[in-house]
Image (cartoon, coloured by chain):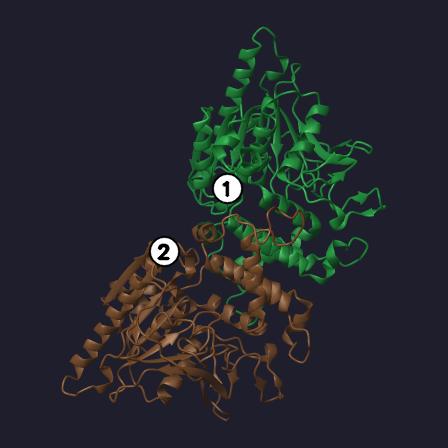
Chain colours: A green, B brown
Amino acid sequence: MSEYVDQTAPGGSVGLVEKKFFTFAAPPHPLTVESGLSIGPVTLAYETYGALSPRKDNAVLVLHALTGDSHAAGYYDASDPKPGWWDSMIGPGKGIDTGAVFVICANVLGGCMGSTGPGSINPATGAPYGLEFPVVTIGDMVAAQKALVDHLGITRLLAVVGGSMGGMQVLEWSVRYPDMVRGAVSLASTTKHSALAIAFNEVARQAIMADPNWRGGDYYAHPEKPDTGLAVARMIGHITYLSDEAMRAKFDRRLQDRCDISFNFEADFQVESYLRHQGKKFVDRFDANSFLYVTKAADYFNLENAHGGGSAVSAFAKARCAYLVVSFTSDWLYPTYQSKAMVQAMKKNGLDVSFVEIKADWGHDAFLLRNPRLSAIIERFLDRMRQTARAETPDTPDTGEAKAGG
Amino acid sequence: MSEYVDQTAPGGSVGLVEKKFFTFAAPPHPLTVESGLSIGPVTLAYETYGALSPRKDNAVLVLHALTGDSHAAGYYDASDPKPGWWDSMIGPGKGIDTGAVFVICANVLGGCMGSTGPGSINPATGAPYGLEFPVVTIGDMVAAQKALVDHLGITRLLAVVGGSMGGMQVLEWSVRYPDMVRGAVSLASTTKHSALAIAFNEVARQAIMADPNWRGGDYYAHPEKPDTGLAVARMIGHITYLSDEAMRAKFDRRLQDRCDISFNFEADFQVESYLRHQGKKFVDRFDANSFLYVTKAADYFNLENAHGGGSAVSAFAKARCAYLVVSFTSDWLYPTYQSKAMVQAMKKNGLDVSFVEIKADWGHDAFLLRNPRLSAIIERFLDRMRQTARAETPDTPDTGEAKAGG
């Protein structure tokens, strides 16, 4: 675990930030999603950090994983106990250096942290959508993000960056809107969700749908929510985010607040207590239906089918960006071989690809944890993208690129 | 997957078999379990195949895994669609050759397939135990098995053989009753349940206990059983029994009975359909409370603490048997390093140990699947145990050892 010795991120904080909202696709021009259904209006909750350069060529779109949100860095209030979910990576002088780039992060379509999702009010009925909300895909999420990027007046993103389901969005962006992406950073991700990953998501969904309080997705008007089902779903997820090694290091067989086993069904072991805690905590911040929708979107993700007629090489033939692909040795949810396969397909298209497998014992979660090596790799990649951008328009001075902080 | 080309087991069937019952520990002499509580009478459901030799030195005790039962081989009725759970291994001319050895297999204490468990009638109340049943350990299961072996007049077992939780019982037997075990075969097992394995069991238990029909374990008198919770628990289990490779080979992203994704929450993919089917099938044969008890017994298993003051080397200092330890390359529930650790501890005690890591893509389930190499390894080990037994009493002819079948 030597790569994690430095838990104090150097560099500064983006400071106080604000959640903003962008609404589009109002009827009579709704968003038609891949299933063929339409939805509108659509709102995306988003945040931005740093300053957009006058040339608008320094924007980095950060894409969150399954249960993430737009709050990637900084604090809403000086009293917040914790900053955004990727504060170790985003800030002045950090891997994604807000002294040099303009960061955008939006909550996904189908989410529950401010963007339109199954818990939003369906204008046709005046009640929450529930399962009337169309099943959305990674492609639909990306299409909604493009509307936001257009709205911000950005024609080409310096980079799209994300891990896990965020990485799927990165890959989708790179082939769906190739002219809009200069660099693409995929961390701990895959071009198509494996049977194993689908299996875990399906069991999690079954746990939610088995909860009588789920009521076929129509629970919003009831005081009881499908909290027990959602907690079990989250516990399943948390197992997949760690690894055997990580669990040994973190918990092993240590007991929780007791000297001996209980000989009953309470949480004897720390790992049990940890999972129960994660489950309970999650239900306070996440909507059960949204969990169904985002996991289904991940399960449906198959870049090869959607863009390459079943071939990864054909899919990446559409791409025009430079790629940075990163995998982690102990990630068994999206193992290195899946990253290597996409790298091969990218290279067969003659694309500019960098690939790094980082030795990390923390399992899939490694992409989210502070890691000086990962920060340095991403920083170098973004620096290179900025140089490329400058080289294309060498005569225009760019005041937005002066380094701050760090 | 080359080791599985031969799915037709050579050798014969043990034919029609019968479930028998052995009852002991009737009050006023109940069985005191490790928690300190007492229980009695205790019944074990068991089966035997082959003939016990006159010297009673050819008995092989087969120990089942989490949700197994006494029905390891043969058929109860000529119309049975499937034989016992390890029929590929047990029979005349098979790895455990019933032409040469006498096989005993009993359902574990705490189980629900005929042995006393939480669904049995508590004589003190006249109602099912439910959670009044004491939490039992692998040691308690083995103590109950010893009563059965004593009852059969066997003073020393030729071998104890089992995989997964059955392997834990094997290891427990070997150090708890060292004089009664000549050979011990541990397949895909561990000396102590890891945090990862505990985590999966705990989430499965939470899924059961979250089901309102579970009613604190007191559901036996109600028509609705905690079936949805138990089904989710089983689905979680089934994920851990396979591997990423196995799931790709078996399912990949193939759709189930449809040409395209559904854009709803039905089972789109074969892997989803498979898991739902396994979950539904399981609730017909298994008791939810028993699932809680057997998983807890596995989680509590720590041979090193129970017999070695925290040291595996000290624990195996008590052993006097020969060991065969087998692990499987793609088993991530009880990975090879755990088998290697026990082998090291056995060797430090100068014990007779054979260790084989079998290349198999099927994950933890590999120990249960027909595998000619595994059969040959076990056959050779048992042959050697029989030779050792003969060498100790060379003057007595043994009519029970003539090979039949094969």
Tell me the amino acid under the disc marked 1: Ala
The chain under label 2 reads: B
- Secondary structure of the residue carrying numbered label 1: helix
Tell me the quarter of the picture where residue A265 sits: bottom right
Q: Which residue is mark 2?
A: B360
Instruction: Tally the numbered discs.
Output: 2
Q: Position of residue A221 (x, y in %)?
A: 82, 54
On the question of residue A285 being in view, the answer is no
Judged left or right of residue A317, residue A63 is: right
* Residue B334 tag number: none
Judged left or right of residue A28, residue B62 is: left
Quadrant assignment for the N terminus of chain B: bottom left
Q: Residue at x 69, y 78 (%)?
A: B222
Q: Residue at x 25, y 89 (%)?
A: B54
The chain under label 1 reads: A
Q: Residue furthest bottom?
A: B28
